Amino acid sequence: MKGENATELAREIRGLLLQLSHQARTPHLGSSLSCADIVALLFAEILRIDPARPLDPDRDRFILSKGHAATTLYAALALRGFFPLEELHRTYALPESRLPEHPSSQCVPGVETSTGSLGHGLGVGLGLALGLRLAESPARVFVLLSDGECNEGSVWEAAMTAPAWSTNPLCAIIDFNGWQATGRSRDVLAIEPLEAKWRAFGWRTYRRDGHDIDGLRTILSGFGADGGDNRPLAIIAETLKGRGVRFMEDDNNWHYRIPTADEVAEGRRMLGLAPVA
């Protein structure tokens, strides 16, 4: 529910991620865990959304551009009441489910656009922000990207365009967990200095601990307020892949590896959660 403690919501999300990866035998657990605090803060406190009115034209928009972390989005939506939690447990990633491994906007309330192919979310978010400005809506747009996704040229085309146009408030949050599928982000491409790059493109830019919910709240709580800085906002959120489960943290094996039942139980114990019934 709106106003739920973001820290507790993040813990519940992480517990669900372990269960879902194990039962559906789906990968990307490490990347889903790394962004749980960011997503929890947005859904608990920041986003102006109502599960009873998922298509409210003045709702804030959230785009999970790193669509491989779909379970984090699904868990947040279910815990916020957009669809039954039991449905997530029962149908996730099954044939004919409306909850596939990558999010689809076709039939899931709260999913604004289908994602999975990296590099598209920010461009879509920019288009939404432009449309909302034309519609004179107060809605804001938030896009969550991965650091590896910043290898895509389409991200930088959108990043260059946004400051040049008058749009509704647009925020890009980069989940910088330092890993890609095949190695460290810094070893795949020369991604740094990432903060300086976003700032050079005209964005109001911060680099913060992506697990410091209080610090992120300070930046995001006033985002889009009338009379504030109208430049688009970029937050490079430094995170740990696998955050919250010590034996998964900063271990890229969990990009693809599936946890065993014993590992799920141990992970939930580390999170301070009860065993799965």
Image: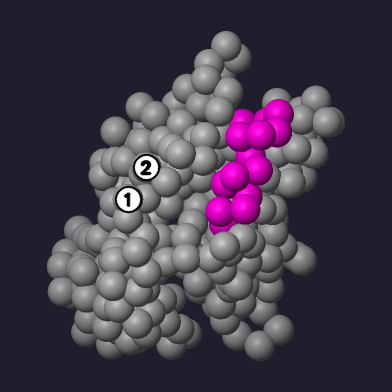
On the question of residue 48 being in view, the answer is no
**Marks 2,1: beta carbons within 8 A:** yes
Q: Residue at x 26, y 44 (%)?
A: 209
The residue range painted magenta reads 155-169
Disc on res. 193: 1
Q: For this view, does 92 lie left or right of residue 179?
A: right
| Amino acid carrying mark 1 in the image | Pro
The location of residue 50, given as percent across then percent down, is 65, 39
Q: Residue at x 70, y 33 (%)?
A: 165
| Amino acid carrying mark 2 in the image | Ala
Q: Nearer the viewer, residue 187 or 224?
A: 187
Residue on which disc 2 sits: 196
Q: For this view, does 57 lie left or right of residue 257?
A: right
Disc on res. 271: none
The location of residue 245, given as percent across then percent down, is 21, 67
Q: Nearer the viewer, residue 110 or 249?
A: 249
Q: Nearer the viewer, residue 69 or 149?
A: 149
